[in-house]
Image: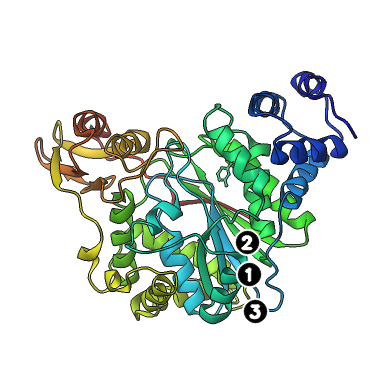
């Protein structure tokens, strides 16, 4: 079918649904290069404003899966369970979580992304480990899963290439924060990676793409329904992203915090989220019968060292320096460390994740344009959490930098801490469970 794209853009702009065949044609045309970026950007913006009904949404997800090859893991025994986060600041949970769940015998095929917008990406964190290669072919990925019960890799060229292209386009055209576009992007990748079940960590709050609970809930329900329509078991947790997750924001700094967590010495919040998401994964993988049992199993895997040795095993298998797990000082470190003082005394009432993310971006921990190289050593380490009492001038964060962007980053950080006289209202970490 020959499509006339300007007419489809007009129809979508005016709120009319597109047919599944038209959506299929758009995705095929965009993947092959017949549809240029400017028409696809206009279509993405039309979807941003007009949304999509379920028929369009399922057709878009299917077309993105069919733009490439799906990974076939059916020959590997066990229920394969993955987790995906919609993106946040300081979200390093994938590293300890995948390692703990795999150490408990549930196979975890995990394909992750790079930083998008202000959010960090698991691939950038893994690449801060010297030698680690996230570029593994489909054959290598299947072999890793068979041998180690785990892979931590990037999206291969063959897997949902339409999403890879569209994701990069959305990042620079103001079309990221759209429920149908986020849901189809995440679910096309996840359904193409050969999973049986999936846990979604849908972030809500200032540091998330979804700022309000209602829109986060709708995103979670949309993804659960796409998964269910494909016969997969999907559960979603709505979790708080009103402050950075844990202390470290920046790639090697987050790997360091993850290693601490796998030594049973992680910050309370990141440990708690690992237990909650891990419990859901173990239930879907039929390794635990209840959330309580699942939490206990994950806690043991973190405390007895088995999660860390699984992580070390996969780091080595993917070409990384396994010694970083015994000695995190082998990770890249920044030349300069600058202490950020509290501007007044009182109780930490809020820590703005966007300002912390901007500070990390200024010193090179993230990208402004997709061609930017990331500096793995840089970022921010918070020294306080919400509810802590501080005196004026007391250190609240440390900025790690290599001589670039530190003045601007300092400005972002000085304004990131809301300090009040009253005890702050604490938000629960797990806001809602959707299954
Ligand atoms: N993560 C994805 O994979 N896609 C999006 O659109 C947003 C977050």
Q: Marks 3 and 1, Cα distance to the nearest angstrom?
A: 11 Å
Where's ligand 1: which quadrant?
top right
Name the residue at 26% across, 51% down.
377
Q: Is residue 217 visible?
A: no
Q: Which residue is mark 1?
A: 284
User: Quick one: quadrant of the C terminus?
Assistant: bottom right
* N-terminal-most mark, 1 or 2: 2
Q: Is residue 21 left or right of residue 53?
A: right
> Front-most of 48 and 211?
48
Q: Is residue 117 left or right of residue 309?
A: right
Residue 63's place in the image compared with 358, above or below, is: below
Q: Marks 1 and 2, Cα distance to the nearest angstrom?
A: 8 Å
Instruction: Tell me the element at label 1.
Output: helix
Instruction: Tell me the element at label 3.
Output: loop
The picture places residue 289, in percent across and down from the top left corner, at 60, 76
The picture places residue 197, in percent across and down from the top left corner, at 66, 65
Marks counted in the figure total: 3
> Front-most of 230 and 141?
141
Q: Which residue is mark 2?
A: 198
Q: Which residue is mark 3?
A: 78
User: Quick one: quadrant of the N terminus?
Assistant: top right
* N-terminal-most mark, 3 or 1: 3
Residue 56's place in the image compared with 323, above or below, is: above
Residue 249's place in the image compared with 21, above or below, is: below
Name the residue at 24% across, 40% down.
348
Mark 3 lies within 8 Å of ligand 1 (Cβ measured): no
Figure quadrant of residue 131: bottom left
Name the residue at 39% across, 64% down.
132
Asked whether the residues under the numbered discs 3 and 1 touch, taking CB atoms below 8 Å apart as contact, a structural biologist would say no
* N-terminal-most mark, 2 or 3: 3
């Amino acid at each position: 079918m020959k499509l006339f794209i300007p007419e489809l853009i007009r129809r979508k702009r005016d709120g009319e649904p597109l047919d599944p065949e038209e959506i299929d044609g758009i995705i095929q045309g965009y993947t092959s290069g017949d549809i240029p970026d400017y028409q696809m950007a206009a279509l993405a913006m039309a979807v941003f404003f007009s949304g999509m009904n379920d028929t369009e949404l399922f057709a878009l997800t299917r077309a993105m899966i069919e733009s490439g090859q799906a990974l076939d893991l059916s020959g590997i025994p066990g229920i394969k369970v993955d987790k995906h986060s919609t993106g946040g600041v300081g979200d390093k949970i994938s590293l300890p979580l995948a390692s703990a769940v795999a150490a408990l015998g549930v196979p975890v095929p995990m394909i992750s992304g790079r930083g998008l917008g202000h959010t960090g990406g698991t691939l950038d964190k893994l690449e801060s480990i010297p030698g680690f290669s996230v570029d593994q072919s489909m054959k290598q990925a299947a072999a890793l899963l068979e041998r180690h019960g785990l892979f931590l890799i990037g999206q291969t060229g063959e897997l949902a290439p339409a999403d890879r292209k569209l994701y990069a386009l959305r990042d620079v055209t103001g079309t990221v924060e759209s429920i149908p576009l986020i849901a189809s992007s995440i679910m096309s990748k996840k359904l193409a990676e050969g999973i049986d079940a999936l846990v979604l960590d849908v972030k809500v709050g200032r540091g998330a793409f979804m700022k309000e609970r209602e829109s986060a809930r709708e995103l979670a329900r949309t993804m659960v329904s796409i998964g269910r329509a494909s016969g997969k078991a999907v559960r979603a947790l709505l979790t708080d992203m009103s402050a950075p997750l844990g202390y470290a924001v920046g790639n090697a700094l987050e790997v360091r915090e993850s290693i601490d967590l796998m030594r049973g010495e992680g910050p309370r919040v990141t440990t708690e989220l690992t237990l909650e998401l891990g419990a859901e994964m173990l239930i879907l993988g039929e390794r635990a019968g209840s959330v309580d049992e699942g939490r206990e199993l994950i806690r043991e895997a973190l405390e007895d060292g088995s999660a860390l040795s699984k992580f070390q095993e996969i780091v080595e298998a993917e070409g990384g320096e396994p010694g970083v797990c015994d000695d995190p000082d082998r990770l890249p470190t920044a030349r300069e460390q600058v202490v950020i003082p509290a501007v007044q005394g009182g109780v930490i009432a809020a820590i703005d994740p966007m300002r912390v993310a901007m500070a990390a971006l200024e010193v090179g921990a993230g990208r402004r344009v997709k061609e930017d190289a990331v500096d793995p050593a840089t970022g921010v380490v918070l020294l306080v959490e919400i509810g802590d009492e501080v005196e004026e001038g007391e250190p609240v964060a440390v900025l790690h930098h290599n001589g670039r962007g530190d003045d601007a980053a300092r400005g972002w950080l000085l304004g990131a801490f809301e300090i009040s006289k009253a005890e702050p209202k604490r938000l629960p970490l797990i806001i809602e469970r959707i299954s």
